Image (tube, grey):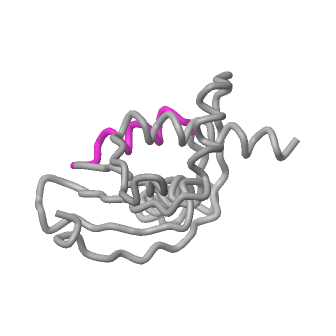
Amino acid sequence: QVTEWLKLGCCCCHLNHRHRRSSSDSLACAMADTQQKHTIVLMQFDKAQESRTYVDYESVQLALDGICHLYEQSLKASNPVLRSITYDISDLFGYIDGLGDLCCLVFNSPSNSYIPHNKEWIKARVFEHLKDQVQSCR
């Protein structure tokens, strides 16, 4: 149940990113359709139910940023003396796969309900989101 999850505040780390490229127009269209929808990220950091928490975001895009920032916080905590850390998408996916649980609930206006999405859905959207960020920097 969502009510069992505890609220967690997030802060941002400013770390360098290294991403691999791919093309997926249909996924990009699907992302554009979900970007402005309220999204709740449910996560469980390990097998203990006490590690459950959630964070809500005003859009899918902000939720994807939040998931990346959670990984960056983990990297920063593991490497406190480093000023800059570089990682690629496979490292981020390894972090996501290693979590006890992770899902997104995305608000669907027509049904006035939240649609659940699993880790694979999250990884596909994170990949496209980061690829879009890299392309917009050029």
Left or right for 44, reference 131: left
The part of the chain drawn in magenta is 88-100
Q: Position of residue 124 (x, y in %)?
A: 50, 34
- Quarter location, residue 106: bottom left
Left or right for 4, reference 120: left
Number of dots carrying numbers: 0
Q: Nearer the viewer, residue 117 or 112?
A: 112
Does the magenta portion include 99? yes
Q: Position of residue 132 (x, y in %)?
A: 72, 40
Does the magenta portion include 52? no
Residue at 42% x, 77% y is 9
Q: Nearer the viewer, residue 59 or 68?
A: 59
Residue at 33% x, 49% y is 103
Q: Position of residue 16 (x, y in %)?
A: 67, 51
Left or right for 126, reference 74: right
Residue at 39% x, 33% y is 120
Quarter of the N terminus within the rendering: bottom left
Residue 63 seen in the current view: yes
- Quarter location, residue 65: bottom right
